[in-house]
Amino acid sequence: MAFLGYVIALMAYIYKKMNNVPEDIMSDSWHKLRQFLARVFIKWGKIMHDHEIIGMEHLPKGPGIVVFYHGTIDVDYVFLICNIYMQRRKMCVTVTDKWLINMPGMKPLMEVAGCIDGNKAECLEMLKKGYLLGVSPGGSRETIFSDQYYRLIWNKRTGFAQVALEAKVPIIPMFTQNIQEVFRGFGRTRKFGIPVFGSFPVKLRTYIGEPIPYDPDITAVELAEKGVGEEQFKGLLVRLQEKKFLVEACTCGMQKKINNVPEDILSNSWHKLRHSLAHYLMKLGKIINGYEIIGMEHLPEGPGIIVFYHGTINIDYVYFVCNLYLQKGRLCVSVTEKALFYIPGMKLAFDACACIRGSKAECVEVLKKGYLLGVAPGGGREAIFSDQYYRLVWGKRTGFAQVALEAKVPIIPMFTQNIQEAFRGYGRTRFMRWLYEKTRMLGIPIHGCFPVKLRTYIGEPIPYDPNTTAGELAQKTKVAIENLRDQYQKTPGNIFRAFSERFNKRAKEA
């Protein structure tokens, strides 16, 4: 999530400079970028969490303070303000922890998101201008120390109530079902910050309660306790928080997507989910990496094997199969590292993405049915031990060539410019190589998700030739990919140069 935040911050900075956006965060000059980001996050919420909002009619037409429970990561609130912006054409200004606003490089993100540090005068000014104001009284304390029992940790905070009374605006309570199941924190101590894991595809449903109207005869403490205090939220939790365990929440979130779908991964019953995921990931590739494909016309109308170079994380291949599915209506079945199939809970993901373990018989069967087959001969070894020089690490693998000869299909070489710059791995040592070869243990420390330019080049097909051996065909394929690499990739790779190529049209011809 931190990487995503910095990616959006970078986008906002570039947008601000290109459009001469003034320092005022409420300027209409931000509208195009805000609208674009809102659409992306609404799609994300719908695909990942089937997010829905109950009670949107309770939001006032004028100003008001939306008070909400803060999960480990408040993605539900992000989805809410995006829906408000698109459906109501209304900005919800967000009171944010001061340490977040002061983080280096985060200022553009805070501006485009309409975040303020929440001093009393600033909040009153926003309300007087007619905006909604979003406040989580628990803040970081609730983020870190609340848990799956959804306890509110507000202590004696009544500042939001004082602002509501002074501005004479209503308070609107809000709670999202299952928000603590999306991300989980552990190691909750008195120190700031906890390790977080998750992004689980659980069902999220945001409930907006009836407004608590302005009443000049009550104090701020009474207002904080009346309606939006802990007792009301506890009652709301009893009525709405029916599932408290991670597995139950995941099942609830996935139920609509996998209902009545047979075991066959090639079944058309997967189409709606695949279409939604492909649409989302294609947008993501365009936003983060300016992703594009050169040479789509080289793909055969019938079956074939697409052989590609495997970066540290092969997001380029993910973007490619998504574009292929949406543009051509074709499913590309992917041969995946066997070790990944043993990760608990991954079977549904692999079924939805049409991934197989890749036995020879299974691959031949897929090709005979007319599908494309995606293979990275380097696999996990190439992902871990290749580097910014883009060396192919195939060893003596020729299985894909044997399959191509038996199925009598062409091989299509593929290479993506800058893929090693999107994510970087470190710790590539002889010991790590020895350990991998002995244990097949996957994984090295990785950092990245850098917004570099990614451009996939599809080479001309290598046709089926019955007079060629598997070894010769594998060598031809390797040379074809190396030729694409040498033609389009500058080595050693450089993250800054790869990022600048997003704005350099001539780089396409390099």
Image (spheres, rainbow, N blue to C red):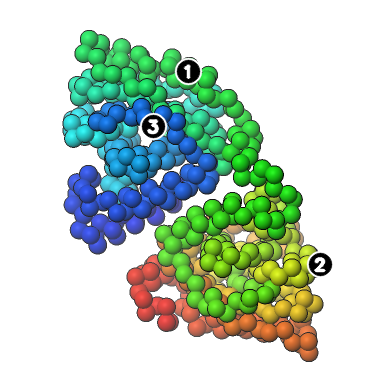
Q: Which one is in front, 14 or 427?
A: 14
Q: Residues within 10 Å of mark 1 (few under 14, many from 20)?
A: some
Q: Which residue is mark 2?
A: 361
Q: Is residue 261 above or below residue 467?
A: above
| Quarter of the C terminus within the rendering | bottom left
As helix, strand or loop, the secondary structure at mark 1 comes to: helix
Query: What type is the residue that disc 2 sits on?
Result: Ala
Query: What type is the residue that disc 3 sits on?
Result: Met
Q: Position of residue 465 (x, y in %)?
A: 74, 87
Task: Decide if residue 151 is on the left or right side of residue 255.
Answer: left
Quarter holding residue 303? bottom right
- Number of dots carrying numbers: 3
Could you tell me if residue 463 is visible in this image?
yes
**Residue 56: mark in rendering:** 3
Q: CA distance from mark 3 to mark 2?
A: 54 Å
Q: Is residue 144 above or below residue 112?
A: above
As helix, strand or loop, the secondary structure at mark 3 comes to: helix
Task: Decide if residue 104 is on the left or right side of residue 443.
Answer: left
Q: Which residue is mark 1?
A: 234
Could you tell me if residue 342 is visible in this image?
no
Give the mark toward the camera: 1 or 3.
3
Q: CA distance from mark 2 to mark 1?
A: 57 Å
Query: What type is the residue that disc 1 sits on?
Result: Lys
Q: Residue furthest top?
A: 217
